[in-house]
Image (tube, rainbow, N blue to C red):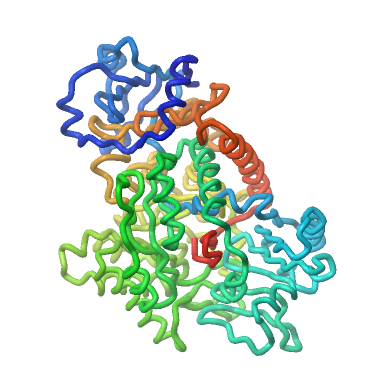
Amino acid sequence: MSHLTRRTLLSATAATTGVAVAGAAPASAVAAGRGPADLVIVNGRVLVMDERCRTAEALAVRDGRIIAVGSAREVRRLTGRRAQVLDAAGGTVLPGINDSHLHLNSLSLNLPPYSYPVDTGTVEELVAVVRDAVAATADPGAWIRGQGWNDNRLPRAPRASDLDPVSGDHPVVLTDFSFHATTVNTVAMRLAGITRDTVAPAGGVIEKDADGEPTGVLREGAQNLVRAVVPAFSPQEVAESVRAGTALLHQRGITSITEPGIGLNTLAVYADEAAAGRLRVRITALLSAGPNAAGLRETLASFVRPEGVDERLLRVGGVKVFGDGIPTAAKTAWLHDPYLDGTNGSLTVDGATIEEQVAELGEIITAAVEAGMQVGTHATGDATIDAVVEAYTAATGRSRRRSDLRHYVIHGDLAPLATLATMAQHDIGMNMNASIKHLLGDSVASVLGDERSAYQAPYRSALDAGVRVTSASDAPVTMPDWLVGVFGAETREGVYGGVTGPEQAISRLEALTSYTRTPAWQDHAEAWKGTLQRGMVADVCIVEGDLLGVDAHDLPGLTVSATVLGGTVVHDATAAGSPTSGPGPAATAAAAAVAMSSRHGADCLGAGACCCRVSDRITGRPFTA
């Protein structure tokens, strides 16, 4: 367990207020600099996480950079009188965790009082949550938001007919566990203008009853019909949520994230937070591409990179494309061979036919590549993944400049073996979610069949093919508990027991690499983060115990004892008041939100919540996870 004296804790707290955490000096300048370390980490097993899998006993930091990693004696020689000393107490020291697919802007906004958890086991229990939320709301016409219903657990999706008797004049919008479906009451449908004659957008589904009337269940792009009328959260609410969510990330040892699919308004919030010195996690942002190339070109024409912000703290890396749905009970992922019931999903970009949609997908990706943007595309079905990879290779062509944009497939649940080989050949990455597979277990066997269910999230096949694989939580879909992800990737165990596709399991070291070094490659940042080598930025996670030696089943219970961001301690589990969001009411609110997030995460794990669609909380419009 790490220890801080009162003096060093106070200095760390003061240092995090209004101070940029991104390292300003290049590695060469640090190596040539003189003077003692201002922070040393001792008494731990240091996992450098470089390609040689080196380990060490201690490391030293000066001006936010690692100046030495080696034996305790070597580091002791660099320790001056005023150096801050972190005692790892025999624990494991590794690079700060890089959650490479996480929706920070909505992490805390998916919790009360903004949104209510409806991940219940029965429709009656869900209705009771809505009834209580209505009773607790003073404004008679206020929107009631909820998140988490799961039609893999419920006998059916909740409908307007369930919600209407308890909601009165309140419009109700409840997003499912995957963020790929929404159910609303009649008031909300009326405000959105949804009738029996409403046509769903491409790839979207408006479920209807036997009489042709909408039931209130909207899937994929059809959710936009109601999201367009849901009041957006204010920039101030989003900013407060970001601070609270960041404190939660620090508790998990997370120092870098990729925020996929945001709008320009949300980017402005991040830029303002960074300029004010309040942004204390490294963000690589992907702009939302939208369903057609024309819309993306319009977004790119309006996009201006944030000025006066260190790109090592906030960087727009590219665009996020939404390819299809998910291969669960929703059955909205596009497959070569249909689901067991004979139905199939589709692409979710614009187009009247699948041929037109495939062409539009190619145009969207080409528009991004022509603008010099990296592309991450949500693609879960094998047919979608094939279309995406083909579009990547076509857009890149033979251009050497374009070949290093480092496009990647997001989720990649059912990536074909031959396509994995093509991805490796063109250095196309894969961003997968072991924690989601852990939650799903074998529950999708009833819709995909045993073979495809076992293959889902093909970590082993991807790595063996030579694909660069990153891992992510997709929070708030699952809480950002990377230790759960490492456990799931290593064991392939489901949350309710049983092992699904053990042949796709990977080693613990491979899993840790997918949360550290490889995400740095995805971020075009491997030269300065992702390992604990000399000259790298001092982003560090300290975990109690032997991370490599502990039984896999004990991994989720390990505690992150300290987190360091750019040489500044931002979390210490033994301290009475680890730095969160600065002094005053904001810090109190952040601490409360973090505690709430932890409880909610435990509830979600128990309920089996999982994957994929989150809202841009300023525009209120959905985008994919």
To which quarter of the image does residue 549 belong?
A: top left
Q: Is residue 325 above or below residue 81?
A: below
Is residue 44 left or right of 615 when viewed as pictured? left
Between 296 and 92, the residue placed more toward the observer is 296
Snapshot quadrant of residue 407: bottom left
* Residue 449 image position (x, y, % from top left): 57, 68
Image point (37%, 21%), residue name: 41
Specify whether 376 is left or right of 201. left
Residue 377 in the image, given as x and y percentages of width and height: 40, 65
Q: Nearer the viewer, residue 375 or 292?
A: 292
- The image quadrant that residue 119 belongs to is bottom right
Residue 3 at x, y = what percent?
48, 18
Residue at x 38% of width, y 39% of height: 509
Is residue 508 visible from the viewing direction of this image? Answer: no
Spot occupied by residue 271 in the image (x, y as percentages of width and height): 39, 50
Is residue 253 depicted above or below 430 in this figure?
above
For image coordinates 70% across by 78% down, the residue present is 190
